[in-house]
Image (spheres, rainbow, N blue to C red):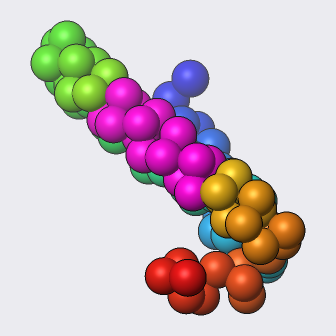
Amino acid sequence: MTLQTMLLVAAALFSVGLYGAISQQVVVMVMMGLELMLNGVILAAAAFWWFLSPTPDGQVLLLVVITAMTVEMAMGFAVATLLHRSRQSDMTDMATDLSR
């Protein structure tokens, strides 16, 4: 695979994630769109590191970013679960004020 192919796949992932995050109203679906967008960015960064400088330094940084992203998504799903339990709805319109 070439760098252009990898960047094209990363752009496609980012585009599908952007469409999913903008067009959905369910909190979990919006989070899935954000996850796809982040995966597209990570794939583009990994492709650049692999084709420009194939050293393990970039791979370690990407593993740290993926780990942080996993923790962030787990916390987001916890908030979405609590929102669903307290308000019996998982729509983004109901999540405008989380103080109650």
Q: Is residue 45 above or below residue 99?
A: above
Expressed as whole percent of the image width and height from the top left, the position of residue 71 reads: 42, 36
Query: Which range is magenta?
Result: 65-79
The residue that appears at 33% across and 37% down in the rendered structure is 68
The residue that appears at 58% across and 48% down in the rendered structure is 78
Q: Is residue 26 above or below residue 67?
A: below
The image quarter containing residue 45 is top left
The residue that appears at 46% across and 34% down in the rendered structure is 70
Q: Is residue 62 left or right of residue 8?
A: left
Q: Is residue 69 above or below residue 82?
A: above
- Work out whether residue 77 or residue 63 is closer to the camera in this orientation and state it: 77
The answer to whether residue 73 shows anywhere in this view is: no
Magenta-drawn stretch contains 13 = no
The answer to whether residue 49 shows anywhere in this view is: yes
Main SS type for the magenta part?
Answer: helix
Name, please, the residue furthest toward the right.
88
Magenta-drawn stretch contains 77 = yes
Q: Is residue 39 left or right of residue 87?
A: left
The image quarter containing residue 26 is bottom right
**Looking at the rendering, in which quadrant would you find the C terminus?**
bottom right
Expressed as whole percent of the image width and height from the top left, the position of residue 67 reads: 36, 28
